[in-house]
Amino acid sequence: MNALKVIIYFSIFKYPLTKEEIYAFSSSQSLEDIEQDLRTLIEKEIIYKLGNYYTDINDATLVQRRIKGNTMAQNIMPKALQRAKLIMSFPYIESVCISGSLAKNYYDDQGDIDFFIITKPKKLWLARTFLILFKKLFLLNSKKYFCVNYFISSDQLKIAEQNKFTATELITLIPIYGKTVFNAFVSENHWAFNYYPNKTINTASLAEDFKKPIWSRTIEVLFNNKLGEKLDQFFKKITLKKWKSNFKHLKKKEFEIAMKSTNDVSKHHPQDFQTHVIVSLNERYDIKNKAFNLNLTMEHA
C-alpha cells in the first residue's frame, strides 16, 4: 500500500494530506492508483477521510490544525524571506534555503523558521560563528525567526545520511538564494528522487544573483587566507566542545547524527528528529499493516 506509508509519515507530524499530496510524496505511477489504495484503506478502517484530507487518526481537529498552520505559514513567509536575505548578506554564505515545517507550508506559535545554509569551502564554521554572534547580540539569542541549524560546505554537497527523513527534508526545501550552488546540491543528491519520483522542488523564489554588502565582501577578503582557515578550525573545536558538554544525554551514535560536526557539515538537532521519525514510521506502519492483513484474513475465513 503505497499511500499508507506516506499518510503515516506525515501523521507523525499530525499533518493530514490531500490525495494529490499523497501522490506527490509516493512512488505510485498515477493518481488513480493512489485513489484505489485510499478506497481500500478507508474500507478496512486503516485510514480515515476527513473532508478532503486523509489520516490514520480519526480526529477532525487535525484538519483544523493543518488549515490554521497553513494560514500562519503564508503569513510568516514574508518575514522568512527577509531573514533569508539577511543571512545571505553574511560572509561566506553561498546559498540559503527555508527548511523544516515552514518549507512544508506549516507554522504555529511554537515553531521556528529553519534555514539550510551552504557555505564556501573551509569557511563553514567561520560563517556559522558570524551568524550565531549576530543572533546573540542583536536577536537576544532568539532562534524563533532565525534558526540556523544546518550548514554544509559547497565542496562537499552530498548528504551522507540517505533515508526517507533526509529525502523528505531535502525535497521540501524552498531555496531562496544561490541558484548555481543549489542546483549543484540537487544534482549531487539525486538519490532523494528515488524516494519521491513524483515530487519537484519549489524553486519559485530562487534568486539568480545576490550582491553582498561591502562590509561582508571586506571580511571575506580579510580572512581569505591561512588565518581564516585556522579561525575556522578554532570555532569548530570550541563549538564541538560546548555541544559535547551540553548534550551528554545523547549516546555517541545519536550525537554523531544529530550534532554532526565535521569540516564540511554542522548540524544542531539535539532532539534527533531523524532517528525518532524513522523509528516511529516503522513501528506505526507495522501496526497498520498487521491490522490490514488481519482484516483480509477475516474476510476470507
Image: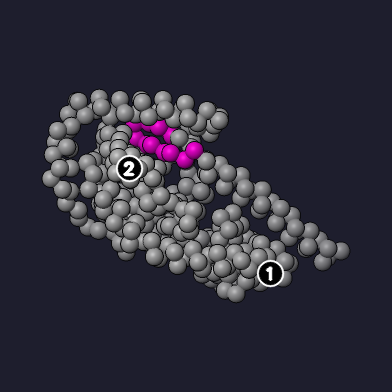
Q: Position of residue 151 (x, y in %)?
A: 35, 41
Above or below, 14 against 18 in this view is: above
Q: Can residue 285 be seen at all in this image of the molecule?
A: yes
Task: Give neighbour class at mark 2: few <14, some 14-19, many 20+ (Cα, 10 Å).
Answer: some
The amino acid beneath tag 1 is: Ile
The percent position of residue 66, horizontal first and vertical second, equals 53, 65
**How far is mark 1 from mark 2, CA to CA?**
48 Å
Residue depicted at 68% across the width and 65% down the height:
58
Residue that badge 2 annotates: 135
| Mark nearer the N terminus (1 vs 2) | 1
In the picture, which quadrant includes the N terminus? bottom right
Whether residue 170 appears in this view of the structure is no
Between 119 and 148, the one lying in front of the other is: 148
Q: How many marks?
A: 2
Q: Is residue 216 above or below residue 207?
A: above
Find disc 1 in the rendering and name its residue.
42
Predominant secondary structure, magenta span? loop
Q: Which quadrant of the figure has residue 203?
A: bottom left
Picture quadrant where residue 120 is located: top left
Viewed as shown, does residue 275 lie left or right of 198?
Answer: right
Q: Nearer the viewer, residue 163 or 237?
A: 237
Circle 1: element type: helix
* Closer to viewer: mark 1 or mark 2: 2
Kindly identify the residue that appears in the image at 35 percent across and 25 percent down: 237
- Tell me residue 22's x, y (percent): 54, 65
Residue type at mark 2 is Lys
Magenta residues span 260-270
Between residues 217 and 108, which one lies in front from this camera angle? 108
Report the colour scheme: one colour
Badge 1 crowding class, 10 Å Cα cut-off, few under 14, some 14 to 19, many 20 or more, is some
